[in-house]
Image: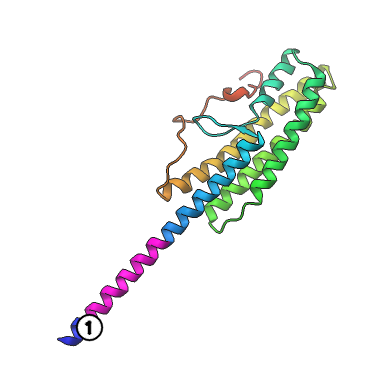
C-alpha cells in the first residue's frame, strides 16, 4: 500500500511539474510575441513608415495619394521628388530594422520576413515615383499603372505578414488588431486604383 501511495505521489508531482513547465513555456511565448509586436509597431509608427488605423498599419498612404495626383496631373515635381526620396529611405530603413528583429518562433519569423519584403518593395516603388514625375506621355502612364499594381502587391505582402503576427497573438491568447471582415476596400488609405477597376 505504501508503494502505491508513493507512486501516486510521484505521479502527481511529475504531472504538476509538467503542467507548470508547459504554463511557463506558454508565458515565455506570450512575452516574446508581445515584445516582438512592440518592436514592430515602434519601427513602423516612430519612423513614419506607417500610420495607425483601426484595421492595422497603413504603409506610406501619402505615396498612394501622390500617385493619384500624378495620374491627374495635379502635382509639384520638386515636392514629389523630395517626398519620394524620403519614402524610399523610410520604407527601406524600417524594412531592414524589422527584418533584424530576432525571434525563435516560426510564426513570427514568417511575419517578420513578409513585413520586411513588403516594406522593401514599397521603397523600390518610391524610387519609381521619382522617375515617373520626370517623364510624360505614354511612358508615364505605363509606369503609373505598374506602380499602382505593385503598390497593391506590396500592400498584400505587408498585410499578410502583419496578419501572421496577429494570428500568433490570437493563438497565444493576446489581443489582436481589429479589422473589417473581408479586408479593406482596394482604394482605402490613398492607394491608387488602377484604371478600369
- Mark 1: few/some/many CA within 10 Å (<14, 14-19, 20+): few
Q: Residue at x 71, y 36 (%)?
A: 90
Residue 158: give x, y in percent of width and height: 60, 39
Residue at 69% across, 19% down: 68
Location of mark 1 (residue): 6
Find residue 102 and report its horizontal and vertical position in percent. 61, 55
Majority secondary structure of the magenta segment?
helix
Q: Is residue 21 left or right of residue 60?
A: left
| Residue 19 located within the stretch drawn in magenta | yes
Q: In the rendered structure, which segment of residues is drawn in magenta?
A: 7-24
Q: Residue visible at 71% across and 21% down?
A: 66
Viewer-proximal residue, 98 or 159? 98
Say above or below: 94 vs 194: below
Horizontal and vertical percent position of residue 27: 42, 57
Circle 1: element type: helix
| Residue 27, above or below 97 | below
- Above or below, comparing residue 95 to residue 153 in the picture: below
* Left or right of 65 on screen, residue 54: left
Amino acid at each position: 500500500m505504501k508503494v502505491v501511495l508513493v507512486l501516486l505521489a510521484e505521479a502527481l508531482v511529475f504531472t504538476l511539474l509538467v503542467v507548470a513547465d508547459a504554463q511557463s513555456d506558454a508565458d515565455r511565448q506570450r512575452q516574446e510575441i508581445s515584445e516582438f509586436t512592440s518592436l514592430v509597431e515602434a519601427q513602423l509608427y516612430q519612423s513614419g513608415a506607417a500610420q495607425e488605423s483601426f484595421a492595422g498599419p497603413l504603409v506610406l498612404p501619402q505615396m498612394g495619394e501622390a500617385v493619384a495626383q500624378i495620374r491627374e496631373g495635379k502635382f509639384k515635381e520638386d515636392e514629389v521628388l523630395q517626398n519620394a526620396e524620403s519614402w524610399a529611405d523610410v520604407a527601406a530603413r524600417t524594412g531592414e530594422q524589422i527584418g533584424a528583429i530576432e525571434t525563435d518562433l516560426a510564426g513570427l519569423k514568417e511575419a517578420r520576413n513578409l513585413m520586411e519584403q513588403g516594406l522593401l518593395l514599397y521603397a523600390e516603388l518610391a524610387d519609381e515615383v521619382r522617375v515617373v514625375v520626370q517623364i510624360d506621355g505614354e511612358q508615364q502612364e505605363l509606369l503609373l499603372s505598374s506602380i499602382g499594381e505593385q503598390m497593391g502587391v506590396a500592400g498584400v505582402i505587408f498585410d499578410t505578414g502583419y496578419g501572421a503576427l496577429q494570428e500568433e497573438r490570437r493563438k497565444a491568447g493576446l489581443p489582436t488588431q481589429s479589422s473589417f471582415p473581408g479586408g479593406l476596400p482596394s482604394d482605402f488609405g490613398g492607394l491608387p486604383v488602377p484604371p478600369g477597376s
